[in-house]
Amino acid sequence: MTTRNALRAAVVLAGAALSAAMTSPAFALVRDDGDDPGRPMPVGEALLIFVGVPVALFLIISLLVTVPSLVRGPRYRPDLGWWAPPVWFGGPSGDVAATIAKAEPVEGRGGASARW
């Protein structure tokens, strides 16, 4: 078990060292030719870009999804009767009334009495 833990620790340390080695040019003290970082981004602009734009896109998409159903209105209106035929998903095809067995009550067994 200790060799497995040692191997895991070595892999984690190697991954950390590799990622630090790959980012080392970012810590350079002398800039390369043509390297122009530009002005720093203000906090308000960063919040607008990284928070405001995704929230606005979320609101626009959710409105585009919900508005058509709000305009149509509900399919079922409580003051009207239900006009759609009943549907039995996964049930037998054909006459449903012929397939339903009439249950006969059994006296003294099952139910909430816990007597089986």
Image: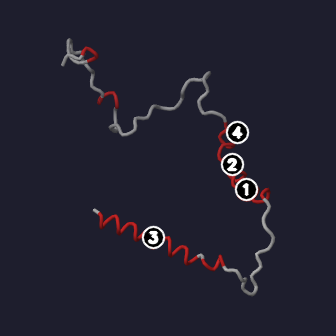
Badge 3 crowding class, 10 Å Cα cut-off, few under 14, some 14 to 19, many 20 or more, is few
Three-letter code, disc 1: Val
Front position among marks 3 and 1: 3
Q: Which mark is residue 64?
A: 2
Front position among marks 2 and 1: 1
Three-letter code, disc 4: Val
User: Which comes sooner in the sequence, label 2 or label 1?
Assistant: 1
Label 3 sits on residue: 13
CA distance for labels 4 and 2 = 11 Å
Q: Nearer the viewer, residue 5 or 71?
A: 5
Which quarter shows the C terminus? Answer: top left
Left or right side of 58 for 107: left
Badge 4 crowding class, 10 Å Cα cut-off, few under 14, some 14 to 19, many 20 or more, is few
Residue at the spot x=54%, y=27% of the render?
A: 82
Front position among marks 4 and 2: 2
Front position among marks 3 and 4: 3
